[in-house]
Image: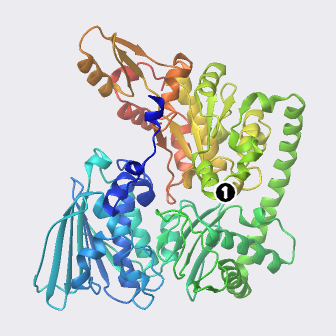
Amino acid sequence: MAEEQIKYTDENIRTLEGVTHIRMRPGMYIGRLGDGRSQDDGIYVMLKEIVDNSIDEFSMGFGRQITIDITEDGLVSVRDFGRGIPLGSVVKAVSVLNTGGKFDDKAFKKSVGLNGVGSKAVNALSSEFRVCSYRDGLSHWATFVKGELSGEAEEPTKEKNGTLISFKPDSEMFGNFAFNMDYVETMVKNYSYLKKGLTLVLNGVSYRSENGLLDLVNDNLSEEPLYPPIHLEGDDIEIVLSHGNAYGENISSFVNGQNTRDGGTHLAAYREAIAKTLKEFFGKNYEPADCRQGVVGAISIQIQEPKFESQTKIKLGSTYLWEKNGDVGPTIRSFVNDFVSKALDDYLRIHKEIVPIIEEKIKSNKQEREEIAGIQKKTREKNKKASVYNKKLRDCVYHYNDKITERTPQEIQDYIDASSIFITEGDSASGTITKARNAKFQAVFSLRGKPINCYKESRKKVAENEELNLLISALGVEDDLEDLRYNRIVVATDADDDGMHIRMLVLTFFMKYYPDLIRRGHVHILQTPLFRVRNKKDNIYCYDQAEKEKAIAQLKTGVEITRFKGLGEISSDEFADFIGEGMRVDHVKLADEESISEIMEFYMGDNTIERQNFVRANLRSEEELEDVDI
């Protein structure tokens, strides 16, 4: 029997054609699936893939308007006024992998979608897909169902040249999905900032920018900058730079019009160039962190055939401006450094009034950093002697096993993507998660009681706090966020009044002192079931009242209901299901334009009627209201 189970013959070898492979392995093409609640969900990647094609037409000088319509039931239409797909290749262009005009440098230069996959993935993952190309009085349309051609025709038309694509994500893949129009609006605004002269019309509302990245930064400023943002443009590069009093760095980055939310080689080069140029201008050996603390800005570059670290294109991996037939151009690092060094230096010599403001900011950053570093060093030494650190962090194999370096680059990247740290409170909860976790890539950090309210305390007071100091060390972000040791930071607290308070205190700490961890999508809140509904045969775990009622109706008789209020109440065997592949998390989001000080004042400031009304309006049931101390 055992031998029959492990037979490996020719019958086991399968060839998956394009559409089938995309539907079986969607993550290879659009990242994650999701239902639209997270901005990283696949339906937004699908929208971007189609709009990117229209953007590329504009970049080549064809068409000055793109119209995007999204209906309430999720049907998307994108119409551009570019050249239109060659009529004889309409079907092939949207259904055959590795087929497209962007492999031809003469037809497309410095575009985003280069791999001949984007529109094909959208087609395969849509329940309905229609493409129509208009060229010189003729049109060619084709319709598809889940990537399979269902009809096509060529006919005369009076429409202007261009392409119209409509699609509806397949509910079999994405469930009961819905587009969050706030995410879509942000995407469209970014396109307008990066493509001066282009008008984008989203559901009847027009977006257009005359000043490029300067408009983006000014529109998104949540606090008054210390000096008017510096706006510099060159061939294939545009930057904006200012300083504010908030902690961290808030720099948006783009490649060929693509918002690279996770940065990449261009953002790293820009961060390096800012510090290098300011140090050289002032003739002093300032620390790079002191030059960049409080920076607000943006960078956009144009390069040929960009290489992204995933199909979702949110992190640039390219080293050179161009590569072709074994030859390479200048490095992105030298390109960005050379431009910033000259252009920013020239600007500061002309606009001398802002020079003392910048240097005073650097000196202030330096003084605070040195004071905090001294306090943190004493606290860490004290904790090291008491062996506190080892008691609070249960690390994962990814970090403490040197053999990880012997793995392939892809295996290492998979570990990095999966690496998580759960921040929890109390021995019971941390013990449950520690037993249930996958120790290969999941770590646990245990808080003792409630952290201090960072909103009400000075940075010095926070630095003296043992709990938060140890948390900073565990995350590895004492000196630079690029040293973050885990891809996901998951706050896991009890579903009761104290648990909610601890959660808010931890999030306040991140929001005030490490906002970029939130902006880059690293911070999450673990969802755990509130109820277990079971009878003699089945267990159903429910995350809200509606799921509980549905489970009761499903099990019908002999039902027993358990209300979980603490993570320690759930056995480690049960809990393993809730932090595995199907783990539910709420993604903590912070838009560039949101004021951190206003958010913290609302949630963590003095008790107000507005906050009480907000809590009441957002509770899931009256039953929950009885458990909450407002």
Asked if residue 347 lies left or right of residue 597, the reply is: right
Image x and y of residue 117, in percent: 39, 69
Residue at x-position 19% and y-position 86%: 160
| Residue pictured at 35% horizontal, 29% vertical | 620
Which residue has dot 1 on it? 248
Rendered image coloring scheme: rainbow
Q: Residues within 10 Å of mark 1 (few under 14, many from 20)?
A: many
Amino acid beneath label 1: Gly
Question: In terms of secondary structure, where does tag 1 sit?
Answer: loop
- Depicted 89 relative to depicted 522: above or below: below
Look at the image and tell me whether residue 615 can be seen: yes
The image quadrant of residue 130 is: bottom left
Does residue 586 appear left or right of residue 224 in this picture? left
Residue 541 quadrant = top left
- The percent coordinates of residue 257 (x first, y second) are 46, 75
- Which quadrant is the N terminus positioned in? top left
Picture layout, residue 372 above or below residue 543: below
* Residue that protrudes farthest toward the left in the picture: 156
The residue drawn where x is 44% and y is 73% is 115
